[in-house]
Amino acid sequence: MQLGHSFGLTKMQTLRLILTDKFIWLLSGAVLLATLIPVQGAAKDIAGILFNAGIFAVFLLHGIRLERHEVKAGLRNIPLQGTIFIWVFGVMLAIGLLFSRAVDQVLPADVALGFLFLGVLPSTVQSATSYCAIAKGNVAASVVASAFINLVGVFLSPLLFAVLARAAGVEITSDTIIKLATILVLPFVLGQAFQKRLRPWVMQHKDITGWIDRGAIALAVYVSFSAAIIAGMWSRVSGEEFVWLAAALSLWLGLAFGGTWLLGGVMAFARDDRKTLLFSGAQKSVAIGAPLAAIIFAPERAGLVILPLIFYHLAQLFLSAPVAVRLAGDED
């Protein structure tokens, strides 16, 4: 009786976590809106201006929020933080490279390239920390790990992709580098520079700044998917190819979540640190990926390239909810 009640509670908790995650609905809505009403013509130019302004604001907020002393303090746990870093930018990158080559014969070239793009991205900040807290993991270490990985990812992800994608015929020009520096790096540096003055206001208005984050990312997805829709994305990716895409991403999710949990055991980490490694290592950031793709690729290509990222991101949120609840239950 008690076991049945506990299992019922777990299902309700899991369902509530999924249904109340606004970002799931926002991303899904952006894809649906792009499919039904793709932005084009004069509206496309306006959306492009809003996109640039929104992404500038997002990375300005990243710079304001990330306190340097927190990163320095958290990095003292070198075994855990080092393992997360190597997993995100080593193992996950290798998985992305292997998968992009493995699916090249069964998926459109830009979608296959999207697997490599997915591999170079850092992990999430907000959802990794939230699910770590739900799972009763080491939240402080999760905050530092996710923040540090994203800080490094702003600089390292474009560099890694530029080097690895060159073999796939992708060339990142000097104009692209300047745009990356202007829209991603500059606002982050400004946020760090004016952190003491602006951080109190930002932290007091989390609802407003949170919607700026989500709205800008959703707009990036909407603009990218709109261009891909107009270019005939749904006719370029068949039903069979979507099955291959889903299968490959399911396998990747299994490797990411299972691999991080097993690695934590091999490293003899405490159980709460294993949970931190799981959620900080297995997730991927659409907050970095969507803007980066929109800057690097032409709009009609960007929608196809971020297709694996969008589906992976949504799937990781659906998977993280029951995993976090299950791990929390194991502590009771």
Image (spheres, grey):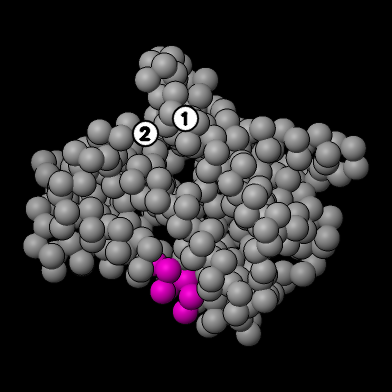
Q: Report the amino acid beneath label 1.
A: Gly
> What's the residue at 33%, 38% (across, down)?
130
Span of residues in magenta: 92-98
- As helix, strand or loop, the secondary structure at mark 2 comes to loop
Could you say whether the residue bearing mark 1 is in a helix, strand or loop? helix
Q: Which residue is mark 2?
A: 66
Is residue 126 found inside the magenta-colored segment of the image? no
- Position in image of residue 191 (x %, y %): 47, 30
Amino acid at the residue labelled 2: Leu
Residue 75, image x, y percentages: 21, 46
- Residue occupying image coordinates x 49% and y 37%: 188
Which residue occupies the foreground of this view, 274 or 314?
A: 274
Q: Quadrant of residue 7?
A: top left
Q: Which residue is mark 1?
A: 191
Residue 134: percent from left, percent from top: 26, 38
Instruction: Describe residue 63's horizontal placement relative to residue 320 as left or right.
Output: right
**Label 1–label 2 contact, CB within 8 A:** yes
Viewer can see residue 299? yes
